Image (cartoon, rainbow, N blue to C red):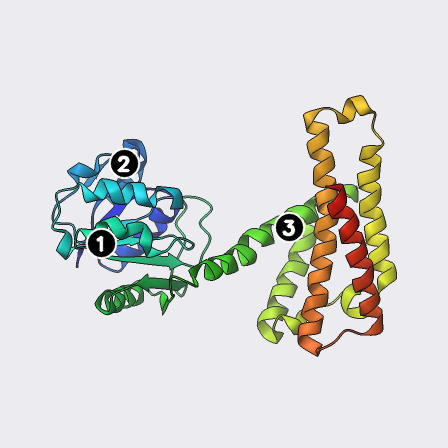
Amino acid sequence: MSRISIVGAGKVAFSLVKALLDAGLNVISVFSRTKESSEKLAAKFNIPLYGDDLSAIDSSSELFFLAVPDSEIENAAYALSNAKLDFHKCLFVHLSGSQDISRLKLLKSKGASIASFHIMQTFPSCEVVELRDHFAAIETDNVTTEKYLFDLALKLKLKPFHISSEKKVFYHLTGVWASNFLIANLFNASQVFQSAKISEVEFLQIVKPIINSTFDNVLKNGISSSLSGPVIRGDLETIKKHVSALSSEVLSNEALSPEALSSDSEKADNFQRKHLLLSYLTNTSTLLDLIKSNYGELSDKQKQIGDFLQDMIRRQKSDL
């Protein structure tokens, strides 16, 4: 299979098309929901055929990558099912990390091969991301298709592995925790930094060294052996001080007049402050889970921290 069509012209499509072309593969067309988006992708990589009408897709296409949002996979499959194609010679591959290949069952019913091909990477914009040495989860119900996609992944300099349909959601959650929730924690850190009222240095400048060192330590020593700070020390006093400071931020906002708190913006801000405190409590509790997993049990001081956290978490949840 050497004639490739791309359905969808979103963020991941730009990086995928670049990798396919660099590997010497033949991308012949791009189709998306709007002609403008398909034209943008096609123009960047000199792809001859583009548009928004899948009925006009080149009938000689054999491999189709569906680079569409998860919620649009079935709609794209339906549109493709009405195209003039020899489905028995076609392979349709969606790029979702969370959705399994059952989303393409309509195309399978027409005789096509189906699969999913998810690259463990974040694509925040249409800027091309180098895919070399990234991992690719391949899900299919056909041994021949799996071998073909493994070979294709290797041509793209990716590291392929098999993923089952039943366990795929946990694989995707892994990426969410490692990437999306990392962003969430950095956002929380930036909110706390604002309360420190430091004007001489920017947030990202001050946290960059500790972020880099933490990640280097994890790569060198593993997750469990890279923890430092008050939890591993069993320093309940510092944790109480943190909670008191975050609680004061919540209380200071609640001290506003009822009229002020009645506005939507003030309600949202107050909820965000309470959520920040709850996030601190749950993350600290997770660190105790890490310690227990690593050492088998907690010290007496760490158990005291656990009791304190459970009590505070119950209070916060009842207030939300």
Residue 193 visible in the snapshot: no
Residue at the spot of label 3: 186
Kind of residue indicated by mark 3: Leu
Q: Residues within 10 Å of mark 1 (few under 14, many from 20)?
A: many
C-alpha gap between disc 2 and disc 1: 29 Å
Q: Nearer the viewer, mark 1 or mark 3?
A: 1
Q: Position of residue 35 (x, y in %)?
A: 27, 32
Residue at the spot of label 2: 39
Q: Residues within 10 Å of mark 3 (few under 14, many from 20)?
A: some
Q: Which mark is residue 108?
A: 1
Helix, strand or loop status at disc 3: helix
C-alpha gap between disc 2 and disc 3: 36 Å
The first of marks 1 and 3 along the sequence is 1
Residue lying at 38% horizontally and 63% vertically, measured from the top left: 137
Residue lying at 73% horizontally and 47% vertically, measured from the top left: 317
Tell me if 248 is positioned left or right of 270 in this view. Answer: right
The first of marks 2 and 1 along the sequence is 2
Q: Position of residue 100 (x, y in %)?
A: 36, 56
Helix, strand or loop status at disc 1: helix
Mark 2–mark 1 contact, CB under 8 Å? no
Q: Position of residue 76 (x, y in %)?
A: 28, 42
Residue 167 visible in the snapshot: yes
Kind of residue indicated by mark 2: Glu
Residue lying at 22% horizontally and 54% vertically, measured from the top left: 108
The first of marks 2 and 3 along the sequence is 2
In which quadrant will I find the N terminus?
Answer: bottom left
Residue lying at 69% horizontally and 28% vertically, measured from the top left: 265
Comparing 185 with 39, the one in front is: 185
Helix, strand or loop status at disc 2: helix
What is the count of numbered marks?
A: 3
